[in-house]
Image (cartoon, rainbow, N blue to C red):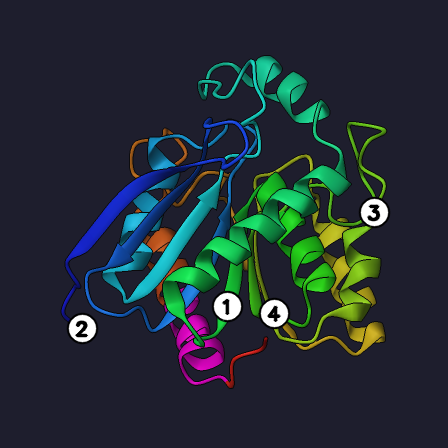
């Protein structure tokens, strides 16, 4: 498939003028839209590159900066403690409000095409929450090594259990997990699998043994090229089926 030429820009929040979201889209009309939800480290260059890659595939991709209210908006990959403290400041209700605004912005870009959501790590948890809360608009969701999905939490502001919310999903869910992740052991993945099945959710779980979180980003020391390419191929096939060929929601 030939890569589309893309345009990218930051969008400022209309009330404050503070940069709120990063948008990348093909120069011709996008075939669908994908809301991207970042890891605890913030909306960094890797997330921008992911948006551009989705745009090269024909999607309008918009990443909300969940830390836009400041003062800290980015943490380095070697600043895990800082990232966790930043993450603790995010109430679920605030994330859902920002995501709803992000979906509004995407709708302006794609017209009547379908909308999906893709999140990584804590963004993988948020992807499920958003897909449930916005079930009338979101046609499909992808979660990469999502943390805190089944009730685990590092903040009292995390008030929603993502697996339980999956009962309200109107579209399918694709979840990637990794084998080398002490925060999401194999028993927890099996529990998530069992509960989703009990709820009657339409989903697929893909697990990569021996791989660590962040395996999809070439610049990180956790990068696993073979698994990253496999996951990306599965993601594009999933989005193609459930967004490009889907009947758009309102």
Position above or below: 140 against 51: below
Residue shown at 51%/14% (left/top)? 79
Q: Can you tell which mark lies on residue 115? A: 1
C-alpha distance separating marks 4 and 3: 20 Å
* Residue matched to label 4: 137
C-alpha distance separating marks 2 and 1: 21 Å
Q: Position of residue 46 (x, y in %)?
A: 35, 36
Q: Where is residue 203 in the image (x, y as percent from the top left)?
A: 64, 72
* Residue matched to label 2: 1
Q: Within the image, what quadrant is residue 2 found in?
A: bottom left
Mark nearer the N terminus (4 vs 3): 4
Quick one: label 3, few (<14), some, or many (20+) residues within 10 Å? some
Check disc 1 and report its element: helix, strand or loop: strand
Query: Which residue occupies the foreground of this view, 93 or 183?
Result: 93
* Residue matched to label 3: 160
Which segment did they paint magenta? 234-246
C-alpha distance separating marks 1 and 4: 7 Å
Residue farthest to the front, as pictured: 15
Q: Position of residue 76 (x, y in %)?
A: 44, 18
Quick one: label 1, few (<14), some, or many (20+) residues within 10 Å? many
Quarter of the image with the N terminus in it: bottom left
Query: Which residue occupies the foreground of this view, 17 or 146?
Result: 17
Position above or below: 218 against 88: below
Q: Is residue 241 magenta?
A: yes
Mark nearer the N terminus (3 vs 1): 1
Mark nearer the N terminus (1 vs 4): 1
Quick one: label 2, few (<14), some, or many (20+) residues within 10 Å? few
C-alpha distance separating marks 3 and 2: 39 Å
Q: Do the residues labelled 1 and 4 touch (CB within 8 Å)?
A: yes
């Amino acid at each position: 498939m030939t890569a589309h030429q893309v345009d990218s820009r930051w969008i400022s929040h209309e009330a404050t003028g503070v940069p709120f979201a990063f948008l990348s889209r093909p120069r011709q009309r996008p075939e669908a839209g994908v809301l991207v939800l970042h890891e605890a480290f913030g909306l960094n260059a890797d997330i921008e590159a992911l948006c551009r890659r989705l745009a090269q595939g024909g999607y309008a991709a918009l990443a909300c900066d969940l830390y836009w209210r400041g003062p800290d908006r980015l943490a380095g990959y070697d600043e895990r403690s800082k990232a966790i403290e930043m993450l603790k400041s995010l109430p679920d209700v605030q994330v859902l409000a920002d995501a709803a605004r992000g979906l509004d912005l995407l709708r302006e870009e794609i017209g009547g095409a379908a909308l999906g959501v893709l999140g990584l790590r804590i963004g993988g948890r948020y992807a499920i929450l958003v897909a449930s809360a916005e079930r009338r608009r979101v046609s499909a969701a992808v979660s990469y090594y999502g943390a805190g999905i089944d009730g685990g939490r590092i903040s009292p502001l995390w008030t929603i259990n993502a697996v339980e919310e999956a009962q309200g999903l109107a579209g399918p869910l694709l979840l990637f997990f990794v084998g080398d992740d002490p925060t999401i052991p194999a028993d927890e993945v099996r529990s998530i699998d069992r509960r989703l099945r009990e709820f009657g959710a339409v989903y697929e779980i893909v697990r990569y043994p021996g791989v660590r979180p962040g395996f999809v980003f070439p610049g990180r020391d956790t990068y696993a090229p073979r698994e990253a390419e496999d996951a990306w191929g599965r993601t594009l096939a999933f989005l193609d089926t459930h967004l490009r060929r889907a009947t758009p929601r309102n």
